[in-house]
Image (spheres, grey):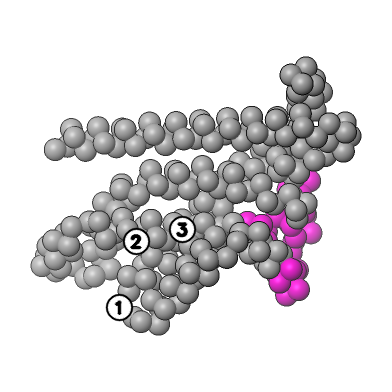
Amino acid sequence: MLTDILDLTVNYWPYFLKGTRMTVVLSVSAVILGVIAGCIAALMRLSRIKALNYIATAYVDVFRGTPLIVQLWIFYLQLTQFMTFPKFSLWGVSMDEFIPCLAALALNSGAYVSEIIRAGIQAVEKGQMEASRSLGMGHWMAMRLIIMPQAIKNILPAIGNEFVSMIKETAIIQYLGVADIMYCRNAVQMQTYQPLPTYYIAAVIYFLLTFFTSKGVNLFERRLKRSDRQAA
């Protein structure tokens, strides 16, 4: 078994490298867009305007309450009915497959990130807002200059963990033909008729990606705590 794994790794590494690259690019893009969507949703949920609050709550409940694979297929089938995507490829992947995947992953991530951001904002002492308002700042100015910088410092480790989760969740995009790790693993299996060794290789790649990402998040979190102690 070990010999088969090593042989496949040596002979088909370009396939696995291509899949790894696509997985990382899609994960990073989805988390970045998810943070933007999550920030908007969190502010809407904290808004005093009830309509915005209801919309954001519905968004979070729907995307957190339905399976990601269902969301992926809905986005793909629905968007392709109403939109014409650019006719170019990114690393051999057609945009009519990549964009629906990115949209579904980003909005799904945004639903979870919104709760992280909302909790981070609410964790800031209420006296901070009151002090800002007493200095003549408006609500949004105080939120932007005083509250959000403190909240961001609290939620960054959780955002890093969301990236770790996203790396694993992208495995479902293989069903739409996007050449991620699992899709490329399947291509190698079709050529070699050796399914088990290819799964081991994919598992090792996912483990390495999540392991080093987690270590980076933990290191960053320790540095944040050290800077807080020094500031105190």
Q: Which residues are magenta?
A: 77-102
| 154 shown above or below 59 | above
Is residue 15 in view? no
| Residue neighbourhood size for the residue with mark 3, other residues' Cα within 10 Å, grouped as few (<14), some (14–19), many (≥20) | many
- Please report the residue visible at 40 percent of the width from the left and 47 percent of the height from the top: 158
Q: Residues within 10 Å of mark 1 (few under 14, many from 20)?
A: few
Label placed on residue 112: 3
Residue linked to disc 1: 48
Query: Mark 1 or 3 closer to N-term?
Result: 1
Q: Residue at x 73, y 49 (%)?
A: 174
User: What whole-number distance in Å separates the C-alpha atoms at marks 3 and 2?
Assistant: 10 Å
Outermost residue on the top side: it is 3
Q: Is residue 46 left or right of residue 39?
A: left
The Cα–Cα distance between marks 2 and 1, rounded to whole angstroms, is 14 Å
Amino acid beneath label 3: Tyr
Residue tagged 2: 118
User: With respect to residue 75, does 33 lie above or below?
Assistant: above
| Crowd tier of the residue under label 2, counting other residues whose Cα lies within 10 Å: few below 14, some 14–19, many 20 or above | many
Looking at the image, is 65 positioned above or below residue 1? below
Residue 221 belongs to magenta span: no
Amino acid of disc 1: Arg
